[in-house]
Image (cartoon, rainbow, N blue to C red):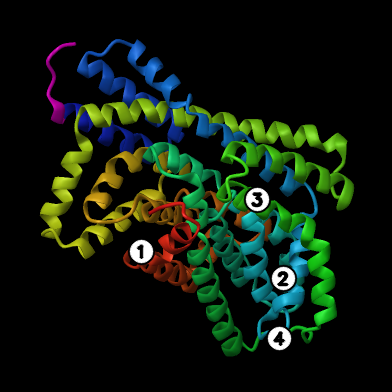
Amino acid sequence: MTAADPTIATIILVVGLLVLIFLRFPITFAVIISTIACLMYLGFPAAALVQNTIRGMSSFSLMAIPFFITMGAIIMGGTIGDKLVDLATATVGWMRGGLAQVDVVASAIFGGISGSPTADVASVGAVVFPIMAKAGYPPAFNGALTMSSAVQGLIIPPSHNMVIFATAAGGVSIGALFLAGYIPLMIMTTLMMSTVYIISVIRKFPKGDKFVLRNFIKQFFISFWALAVIFIVVFGVVLGYFTATEASAIAVVYTLIISIYIYKGLKWRNVWALLDNAINTLSIVMILIGVSAAFGFCLTFLQVPQATAELIYAISGNNVIIVFLMINIILLLLGSIMDMAGLILISTPILLPVAVQAGMSPITFGVMIVLNCGIGLITPPVGTTLFVTSSVSKVPVETLVKGNVPFYGCMLVALMIITYFPAVTLTLPRLFGMIA
């Protein structure tokens, strides 16, 4: 290995990555190219890239990701979304702006089953868009609300992005992460429902039918089979009956059975197409995880995390409030231009040590980074969920962004609460003995 300037190597690695992203290279190729260029400059053999890539994909905890992705594909291909919309309608449809409130609640519940905002928009959105349009809700409002509500599911299980973070962070309990997102979810849902109510009063959106207990009980029992997925994944892991990998595998078989034989919204002949889509997604995610491990090796070798910590503390004057704010700003900016999994894998080794040094729990940081990435999914120029929503709702992207301003506000308020009030994320993990 030849002598090399660490500063130049860092520029090649980090600035090279950002330049390639701005040139619209796929994130996986951007990571590979910048990592290879850095390793070559540092004089490492080509085997270093291969070794670190394989090491990055060899973690046992990553085995849960294929199952969670497959489960999301199966759920999206069935009619579980319809059942959850009916349950949400029976629960909150009576309120002012009832259909909009249904959208928020249904997305929160569906997110706790599928773990995918894209699946949420495609399933719940496909059901509620026509109904809301017929009731007189503006399309821009419908689309903005649906895509913002879909982000809620990222911070609760079975979010495979939580598993990715746990792997990138090293030694963080997946069970604790799964529990940590529930109170933030309730805060975000409450903020969104309150905002919907205010907008509904101002714009005179209609109320739904009166609350009928019999109808609620009926819809709850119909939806029970879908809701049971939450108990399998969450309580199975938290109570120690399953590992996250075992729970995810059981959940795949379970959702396949209820989708085909109980709800009958999925046919066996369609399963292979869903599995093909899941494999396509999984291949992208796993390759990205592998090359990000090689990227992380370069970061560690060049001591980028330490340098980043020193820079942030120098700018903030060791003020913890400003340190946390700077971390959030960095993540929000990167989230608008980077893929979610890539951002988690690349930024965690850099920013997690800074946050921990400032007194933040890795559990809190995990919820915080995933929510930041979720906001990035509905923010241009690279917001995947934003473009999916535009396609499903037939509303232009720029119109959706304008309509989403109040809901951006809700998510940012929730983000600040998560950041500065650690009890929000740590209470449930402590209650169940997952952390000290």
Spatial CA span between label 1 and label 2: 30 Å
Q: Of discs 1 and 2, which sits in the foreground?
A: 1
Asked whether, in this view, residue 4 is left or right of residue 386, the answer is left
Spatial CA span between label 3 and label 4: 30 Å
Q: Looking at the picture, which amino acid does disc 1 mark?
A: Pro
Residue identified by numbered label 1: 422
Q: Looking at the picture, which amino acid does disc 4 mark?
A: Pro
Query: Mark 3 near mark 1, Cβ–Cβ under 8 Å?
Result: no
Q: Looking at the picture, which amino acid does disc 2 mark?
A: Ala
Label for residue 88?
2
Spatial CA span between label 1 and label 4: 38 Å
**Residue 339 seen anywhere in this rendered image of the structure:** no
User: Picture quarter containing residue 40?
Assistant: top left
Residue 153: image x %, image y %? 57, 57
User: Picture quarter containing residue 84?
Assistant: bottom right
Residue identified by numbered label 3: 114
Q: Residues within 10 Å of mark 4 (few under 14, many from 20)?
A: some
Q: Of discs 1 and 4, which sits in the foreground?
A: 1
In the depicted view, which residue is nearer to us: 277 or 58? 58
Q: Earlier in the sequence, mark 1 or mark 2?
A: 2
Q: Residues within 10 Å of mark 3 (few under 14, many from 20)?
A: many
Residue 143: image x %, image y %? 61, 65
Q: Of discs 3 and 4, which sits in the foreground?
A: 3
Q: Is residue 69 above or below residue 288?
A: below
Query: Mark 1 near mark 4, Cβ–Cβ under 8 Å?
Result: no
Query: Mark 1 near mark 2, Cβ–Cβ under 8 Å?
Result: no
Q: Residues within 10 Å of mark 1 (few under 14, many from 20)?
A: some
Q: Of discs 4 and 2, which sits in the foreground?
A: 2
Residue drawn at point x = 61 percent, y = 84 percent: 200
